[in-house]
Amino acid sequence: MILTRTIIYSARGLLAHKSRALLTMLGMIIGIASVIIIMSIGASAQGLILNQIKSTGSNLIGVLPGASDENGPPATALGITVTTLTYDDAQAIARKENAPHLVAVASYVRGSATLTWQNRSVDTTFMGTTASFIDVESPEVEVGHFFSKDDERGISRVVVLGSEVAENLFSGSNAVGQTIKIKRESFKVIGVMKEQGTVFFQNQDDQVFVPLETAQKLLLGINHLGFIRAKTDSEDTIDQSLEDIRATLRVRHDISDPSEDDFSVRSIAQALDVLTGVTDAMKFFLASIAAIALVVGGIGIMNIMLVSVNERIREIGLRKAVGARRQTILFQFLVETSVIALGGGLIGTAIGAGISGVVAIVANVLGYSWDFIVTLGSVALAAGISILIGLIFGLYPAYRASRLDPIEALRYE
């Protein structure tokens, strides 16, 4: 009975100052909405990245120039140019006596350029690679054919277009057999790739493919590789293939101490583990920054409740004069702060979920396979945090109200 009356008094106190209660909630609304948005978008982005990596194949191995520890990214992933890998390294890895479980090995370099045909031009990315690219990554050629093993070396001026580049340059006309210019050098179009979409935030259709040595010598002026990818005959042989590749490269680079490796060899599973760790850390770091708004909201609640105590001193004195105990007054004000905090938390959760949903819709319209992720656990956590903040920051005003002397309170003007 006493509990029911206390809750009724708390509700009346809030309803008597609805505007102030809503403004008090604002800090909680912003804080909870920020946390929900960051956690949702972070989880969705993490899922997108990991799913795109998985889609490239679970039996792929990547070789990057530059050393790294097992838990960190290689130097090249941080934008640092390292020149320790060569085409001959890739050829050595591909030999059966060195790595018997590898079925295909491809070499890669990247660059950007303007492609022109007649009076049209397109800015795009070109990929210098080997004929084995088809075997490693399993893309499909829609029209024409991919370049051959003989085209890898000898600076062959042939090019295979991504579907989007072909459409932008030729507007549906047959591109095969046409001559285009890349950095003022003439190339014959021998094929157009089938549409692939976006993988790992890279539009696979907005790029072109040229033979490796052509890209190195003619377009980039380099001798090194950007990276190597290898495909194993089975997921079960990945670990053995990793060791085979490391052993081969150490012999070629005259490295006796593994701590002096000038390359990094990773499987898709290892890359997933590293990326999961990095994205988890970033997600929770950003969420913790957003949570500062919750503290600000809690301080706002405490300040408003202190004002409320001062405004209701005579009411408190009257209640205590007719028999209300300190615990009852304490509980009343704690209920009020908890309701304000919980209300702000629920509204903030709804706003955060709504904004996250809009982001998911926009991302899917842009072509990304973006999942909308707001879990019941995150909603429950937001509600729990809201109540906890209400209790923590409402404790002092409630304690101050409960300690008022009824006689002094009744005399208060």
Image (cartoon, rainbow, N blue to C red):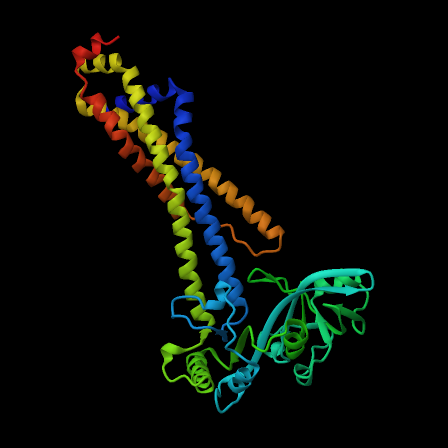
Would residue 261 be found to the left or right of residue 115 on screen? Answer: left
In the image, 368 versus 251, the foreground residue is: 251
Residue 274, given in percent of the width and then of the height, sits at 42, 65
Number of marks in the rendered image: 0
Residue 205, compared with residue 225, is above or below; it is above
Residue 405, compared with residue 201, is above or below; it is above
State the residue at coordinates (46%, 86%): 248
In the image, 120 versus 35, the foreground residue is: 120
Residue 374 seen in the figure: no
Residue 337, given in percent of the width and then of the height, sits at 31, 28
Residue 139, given in percent of the width and then of the height, sits at 63, 72
Question: Within the image, what quadrant is residue 258 found in?
Answer: bottom left
Residue 211, compared with residue 391, is above or below; it is below
Q: Residue furthest front?
A: 221
Residue 352, compared with residue 299, is above or below; it is below
In the image, 198 versus 125, the foreground residue is: 125
Q: Which quadrant, please, contains the N terminus? A: top left
Q: Which quadrant, please, contains the C terminus? A: top left
Question: Within the image, what quadrant is residue 238 found in?
Answer: bottom left
Residue 35 seen in the figure: yes
Would residue 107 be found to the left or right of residue 246 on screen? Answer: right
Q: Residue furthest bottom?
A: 97
Would residue 146 be found to the left or right of residue 223 on screen? Answer: right
State the residue at coordinates (46%, 52%): 42
State the residue at coordinates (48%, 80%): 234
Would residue 256 be found to the left or right of residue 355 on screen? Answer: left
